[in-house]
Image (tube, rainbow, N blue to C red):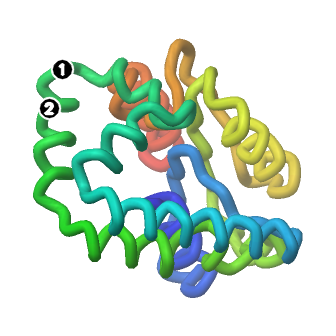
Amino acid sequence: MGARAALQHAIQSPTIWDALILFSPNPGIENEPEREQRRQADEALAQRMEAEGLVPFLEYWRSTPLIQSQQNIPTEWLQTMQSNRLRQSTQGLAQSLRQFGQGNCPNLWPKLDVLQIPLLCITGESDTKYSKISERIARELMNATHITIPDAGHMPHLEKPRASVETVNAFLRQFTN
């Protein structure tokens, strides 16, 4: 969700950004029937969370294909993440799905061209869905680059932090020369 929030802010206020680094971004669902389907799926997840409670929902969530790669996050970090998740409220997380899920977020694809800044999209090699999305962003924006991190999934910055930092630093060096 962080990439989605940053992308939306950059599109709404493009003149205050000098560059943008996005991990596993998605500018949105373009097809309205697919957006409605996603809204319904997010609502079902929110209702499931409310009915089952936080712990059972988090166990289910960790088993989903997109999230499974998080098991590759260093143990100490993963434990901290899990501890933080357990401090969340069921109601707050359900509302997050309802209000900030992909189905409710605007389709930003038609607005990407307002970004005239250098843009770096980073995805994990095994996250094929978001890698394809980032490849498309890089094709559509001549100032965008897509880098995949080997042996990583949806959260390459946590699953392979050293490779992610090296990638970010290489991108940032273009601004210091």
62 left or right of 35 in image: left
Q: Quadrant of residue 33?
A: bottom right
Q: Amino acid at mark 2?
A: Gln
Q: Is residue 14 above or below residue 82?
A: below
Residue at figure coordinates x 62%, y 79% from the top left: 104
Residue at figure coordinates x 63%, y 63% from the top left: 41
State whether residue 21 appears in this view.
Answer: yes
Query: In terms of depth relative to the viewer, which is nearer, 41 or 176?
Result: 41
> Residue 21's spot in the image, x, y percent?
51, 51
State whether residue 17 appears in this view.
Answer: no
Q: Quadrant of residue 12?
A: bottom right
**Dot 2, how many residues are within 10 Å of its Cα: few (below 14), some (14-19), or many (20+)?**
few
Residue at figure coordinates x 72%, y 44% from the top left: 134
Query: In terms of depth relative to the viewer, which is nearer, 82 or 175?
Result: 82
Provide the residue designation for mark 2.
79
Provide the residue designation for mark 1.
75
> In what element is the residue under mark 1?
helix
